[in-house]
Every structure is written in structure tokens, then in C-alpha cells.
Amino acid sequence: AQRVTQPEKLLSVFKGAPVELKCNYSYSGSPELFWYVQYSRQRLQLLLRHISRESIKGFTADLNKGETSFHLKKPFAQEEDSAMYYCALRAGSYQLTFGKGTKLSVIP
Amino acid sequence: DVKVTQSSRYLVKRTGEKVFLECVQDMDHENMFWYRQDPGLGLRLIYFSYDVKMKEKGDIPEGYSVSREKKERFSLILESASTNQTSMYLCASSQLPGTSGTSTDTQYFGPGTRLTVL
């Protein structure tokens, strides 16, 4: 069965500092990986997906199959980045498996 | 713009009551999902449906059932609510993979229903 691990429940960084939210997965096939974000009092929404290889709001994530990781990175954190971040995996079906989430707090 | 709505933002029920949570999407999506979101546990899939009248168990279906009589509506039913079902419930919908012109992998979420069972 597939699994997604986000080792940090809470990550605090200062404004302007680099951010890295860790995500590791276990799945024997070719997964599709996503990052979802939930800002305060807003609904959960897609941030980015690995197949798009895009940068959204300054965030990027690279799928590393050798390390089975999909870490989310941003070079300079902003206060508006404070939110709950979930890594998710789709493994050949319609459903997603989510990690437990990391709360990012950007300190002004 | 995809819209997923849930019937209530807040709900308070008593132990043993039958509870209905309704979700409606307006994007003609085939797939619909029910999750519960708990601090420290993330999102856990309860049930999902890939077509009208079709349903599949997720990771934690015990104590829940679902109904999908129309494509746009997916209901979550707590047959006899218990205190350990106090949680935030999220509904989501997505398009079938392979459908052209859409972000087929994207799940669109509703605002959530915070259910408290006393």
C-alpha cells in the first residue's frame, strides 16, 4: 500500500529565509505527486503537481525517485506563505493518499 | 470556476443521532470524495464515488455510509453518530483521468463541515 510521510508537524522560518517542506513516499510503481495548501479560513486547494514542473507562488518541488521524495521549496519565505501544507500521492487510481500535513509559520 | 459546496459549515449533533452531510459540485465531475480532517492525522479518505450509484470504501469507512443518486450530489451518512466522529469533514470532486482540457488530477474541495457530536 502507498504511504506519504511528512516528518515535520510544524515548521517555523523567518521571513526571507529559505523554506523546505519535506515529503517522502512509498510506492512501488510510478506515482503522481501533489502539494495541496490550506490557508487560514480557506478551503484546501492544489498548489502544484510534479508532472507540470511549474513554479507556483515561488514554490517548486522536484520528484526524486531515487530518494522517493517530493520536497517543497521556496528560496525566500513570505508571511502569506503561512498555511497548512499537505503532500499527496496518486497511485494509479482516482484517489489520493495524503500525508499528515506540515504547518508552516513564517515569522515577520 | 469549480464550485463545491457543503450543506453546513457547523453542525452539532447528539450521540446516536443519524447525520447527513451533503455535498454538491457544479462541474459535472465524475469523481467525488469524502474525507475527514483531524489535527495530526491529516486527511483520511472515508468513501469515494466514481459514478452515480457507485461507491468505494476508503481508508476509514467504519461507521459511515454514502449515497450518490445524482452526479452532482454526494452524501455522507453517519448512521449513529459517536463522539469519536467529531471532526472536520471535507468533500472533494475531480474529473476522470484522460478527459481532455481539464486538470484531471486536481481535486477541488468544499469549505468543510465541522461536526461536533456531544
Image: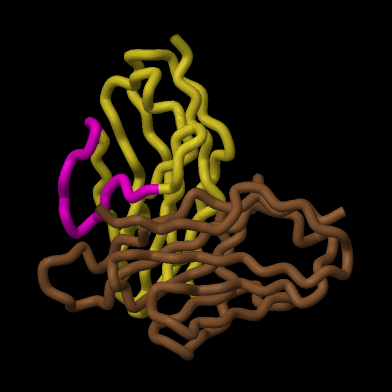
Chain colours: A yellow, B brown
Q: Position of residue A61 (x, y in %)?
A: 27, 45
Q: Nearer the viewer, residue A2 or A36?
A: A36
Q: Which residues fall within the magenta stretch? A: A45-58
Q: Nearer the viewer, residue A13 or B45?
A: B45
Q: Is residue B86 visible?
A: yes
Residue pictured at 82% horizontal, 73% vertical = B80
Residue reaching furthest to the left: B101
Q: Position of residue B93 (x, y in %)?
A: 39, 66
| A11 relative position to B101: left or right | right
Residue pictured at 51% horizontal, 55% vertical = A99
Quadrant in the picture for residue B102: bottom left
Residue A100 lies, with reference to residue A58, above or below; the image says below
Residue reaching furthest to the top: A108
Residue pictured at 33% horizontal, 50% vertical = A46
Asked if the stretch drawn in magenta spans residue B70, the answer is no
Residue B35 lies, with reference to residue A58, above or below; the image says below
| B78 relative position to B92: left or right | right
Q: Is residue B38 visible?
A: no
Q: Position of residue B53 (x, y in %)?
A: 47, 90
Q: Position of residue B46 (x, y in %)?
A: 59, 71
Q: Nearer the viewer, residue A40 or A3?
A: A40
- The tally of labels here is 0
Asked if the stretch drawn in magenta spans residue A47, the answer is yes
Residue pictured at 47% horizontal, 14% vertical = A107
